[in-house]
Image (cartoon, rainbow, N blue to C red):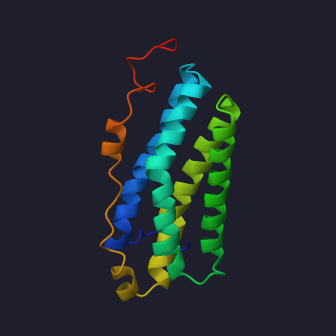
C-alpha cells in the first residue's frame, strides 16, 4: 500500500480484531510451551480445545460475514481463504498426531502470519471495497468470549509458574 496513514478500523471489523488478539496469544502460548520444554501432547490438547471452542467459529464467521462481501475471485479474499484451509489442515494433522512439535511451531507461525495479514491488508481492503452500508450489517457481531473459553481450561503450560516437567 502506498498510503502510509493507517485507515480507521470500521466498527464492523472491531469484533474480529478483538478475536485476533486471542489468536495471536495462541501462537505465543504454543511458542512458550515449546520454549519451556512442555510436551507436544499438552500443547496440542490446548490447541485443539482452543480451535474447537474459538478459532473455528471465528473463521466460519469471517468467511460467511466478511469474505462473502468481496467478489469470489478477489485476490485477497482467496489468499485469506487459502490461509484458513492451511490452518484447518495443520489442526487436522495435530489431531491425528499430538506429538509433532514441528507442526505446532508451523501452526504458530502460519496463524500469526494469517492474522497479521488480515489486520494489515485484508481489513483495509474490505473497508476500501465494501460500501459502509454493507459493512454496517456486520457491526452487530459480538467477539468470541475467549476469557470464558480460558476458564474451561486448567493446564496453563505457558504460565511462568509451570516448570517444564509439570
Look at 35% across and 63% down and name the residue there: 15
Q: Is residue 112 above or below residue 79?
A: above
- Residue 82, position as x, y percentages in the image: 67, 63
Q: Is residue 61 above or below residue 129?
A: above
Q: Is residue 24 above or below residue 155?
A: below
Look at 69% across and 42% down and name the residue there: 93
Q: In this orientation, does residue 128 appear?
A: yes
- Residue 80, position as x, y percentages in the image: 60, 65
Specify the farthest residue to the front: 96
Between 2 and 76, the one lying in front of the other is 76
Q: Quadrant of the N terminus?
A: bottom right
Look at 52% across and 11% down and name the residue there: 165
Q: In this orientation, does residue 23 appear?
A: no
- Residue 55, position as x, y percentages in the image: 48, 52
So how many labels did they put on this image?
0
Look at 58% across and 42% down and name the residue there: 108
Image quadrant assignment for residue 48 = top right
Between 80 and 95, the one lying in front of the other is 95
- Residue 100, position as x, y percentages in the image: 69, 31
Amino acid at each position: 500500500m502506498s498510503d502510509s496513514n493507517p485507515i480507521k478500523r470500521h466498527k464492523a471489523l472491531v469484533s474480529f480484531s478483538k478475536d485476533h488478539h486471542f489468536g495471536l496469544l495462541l501462537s505465543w502460548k504454543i511458542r512458550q510451551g515449546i520454549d519451556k520444554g512442555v510436551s507436544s501432547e499438552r500443547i496440542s490438547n490446548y490447541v485443539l480445545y482452543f480451535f474447537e471452542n474459538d478459532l473455528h467459529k471465528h473463521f466460519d464467521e469471517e468467511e460467511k460475514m466478511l469474505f462473502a462481501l468481496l467478489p469470489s475471485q478477489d485476490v485477497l479474499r482467496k489468499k485469506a481463504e487459502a490461509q484458513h484451509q492451511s490452518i484447518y489442515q495443520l489442526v487436522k494433522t495435530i489431531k491425528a498426531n499430538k506429538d509433532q512439535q514441528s507442526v505446532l511451531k508451523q501452526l504458530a507461525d502460519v496463524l500469526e502470519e494469517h492474522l497479521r495479514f488480515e489486520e494489515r491488508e485484508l481489513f483495509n481492503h474490505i473497508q476500501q471495497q465494501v460500501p459502509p452500508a454493507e459493512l454496517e450489517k456486520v457491526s452487530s457481531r459480538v467477539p468470541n468470549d475467549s476469557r470464558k473459553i480460558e476458564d474451561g481450561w486448567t493446564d496453563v503450560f505457558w504460565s511462568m509458574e509451570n516448570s517444564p516437567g509439570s
